[in-house]
Amino acid sequence: MTTLALFGGPPIRARAFQAWPHSDQAELGALAGVLTSRRWGGIHSGSQGEVFEKALGEYLDVPHVAVVSSGTAGLMIALRALGVRVGDEVVVPAMTYAATATAVSVLGSVPVFADIDSDTHTIDPSSVEAAISEKTKAIIAVHLGGHPADMDRLGLIAEERGVPIIEDCAQSLGATWNGAHTGSLGRVGVFSFASTKNISAGEGGAVVTQDGELAARIASLRDHGRPLGVTGHHPELGWNLRLSEFQSAILGVQLERLDRQLAAKTKGAAFLTSVLSSVPGLRPVPADLDPRVTRHGRFSLAFTIDAGAFSNISTSSFRSALRAEGIPVGLRDLIACPDEPIYADSAVRDYAHSRTVSCTQARAACTRLVLFGQAAGSGMLLEDPSELADVVRAVEKVHDNCGPLREAEHQRAMTRVPSDS
């Protein structure tokens, strides 16, 4: 049995996988063009922002797009544009990046945490139904990891209750549900262009909608509360949440590559899912792709680990051992949103009010999740299966060395136990 790299043995892979985010001379040319134009920001006719908005709208098949400074800013704008106010409730999944919930909280509204589906890790429609009250003003459906939430059932619930859906598409650009792009399925869609996302300008976001009246409000809220094209008239309270011309130019270049990269990532993910599914104790998320998911966004490739099949080692030890073998995997332990200090600890100065309907599945998933791909800051899913075979060999090596890992965990635990005096 080969010694784990974590304990001094040779790693399975010594060379790096492809980096993420990806860039080449096209981005450099786009940046140089903005630099020499001397028009680096603001909203104006013929701007890079306007050009990218048009391209993204055509890609998503939505008529109205507003680029903004971040995905979080986009959520805040969407909530405000839909009339969500102080004290109103917004249903959000219990497992998502904290910004989905904090965007609600910073507006003085109350996130209501619904549980996730144990197979897809997206928001559970049954839990959403239980979460809705007379105070509910919106539902945020997060397409986690690039997997669309169940927009059929959520759409029925929203229609029956008269509550709009905001799609949090931060991780799902390019994903489709029954052939329609995420972002085009709810009342509003919000995208993120942060460093790990499917296209990236370091930061940035976009808010999209089919509703022209709502689009005008969105455009106003991102630009000091003034209507689009107006410079000195401010009829409502807004923010400066505009995107720079440099970022818009980069995003235009990256959007052109998106479908090619998604095709490569789909191939890589299919290979790893097929082969790693045979490793005892590893289960892909989802186990089987819903036929309504006509394209997965492949922000990440997720597995859950059954500790019993790995000699009861912790998920943290499993991830650390893989990373030492040269396999980029997310090391951070996930926290269910209701357990974040901002919501769970009343002693925190900025303690925010929330309500939790259910969090059982979310908490369980957080303790067992293993993430490959952009979630770990890597473009590894773009690689050919011949390169990704190293991932398989590393997982098998860790599986075969569970005993030493478990012993190391035991020794660490013993050193933390104070001796009797």
Image (cartoon, rainbow, N blue to C red):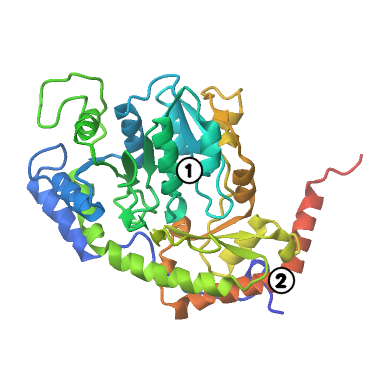
Q: Secondary structure at mark 1?
A: loop
Q: Quadrant of residue 393?
A: bottom right
Viewer-nearest of discs 2 and 1:
1
Front residue (pair 343, 322): 343
Mark closer to the chain start, 2 or 1: 1
Q: Is residue 70 visible?
A: no
* Mark 2: amino acid: Asn
- Direction right: furthest residue: 421
Q: Which mark is residue 97?
A: 1
Answer with left or right where residue 56 lies relative to residue 379.
left
**As drawn, is 109 to the left or to the right of 24?**
right
Mark 2 vs mark 1, CA separation in Å: 32 Å
Is the Cβ of the residue at disc 2 closer than 8 Å to that at disc 1?
no
Task: Name the kind of residue labelled 1 in the image.
Answer: Tyr
**Residue that label 2 marks:** 401
Name the quarter where the N terminus is drawn: bottom right
10 Å crowding of disc 1: few (<14), some (14-19), many (20+): some
Instruction: Identify the residue at image location x=56%, y=63%.
Output: 287
Who is closer to the viewer here, 122 or 242? 122
Tell me: 318 left or right of 146. Answer: right
Element assignment for label 2: loop
Of the 4 image quadrants, the one containing the C terminus is top right
Q: Position of residue 340 (x, y in %)?
A: 57, 35
Residue at position x 61%, y 71% from top?
395
Give coordinates of residue 154: x percent, y percent. 44, 42
x and y, in percent, of residue 153 in the image: 45, 45
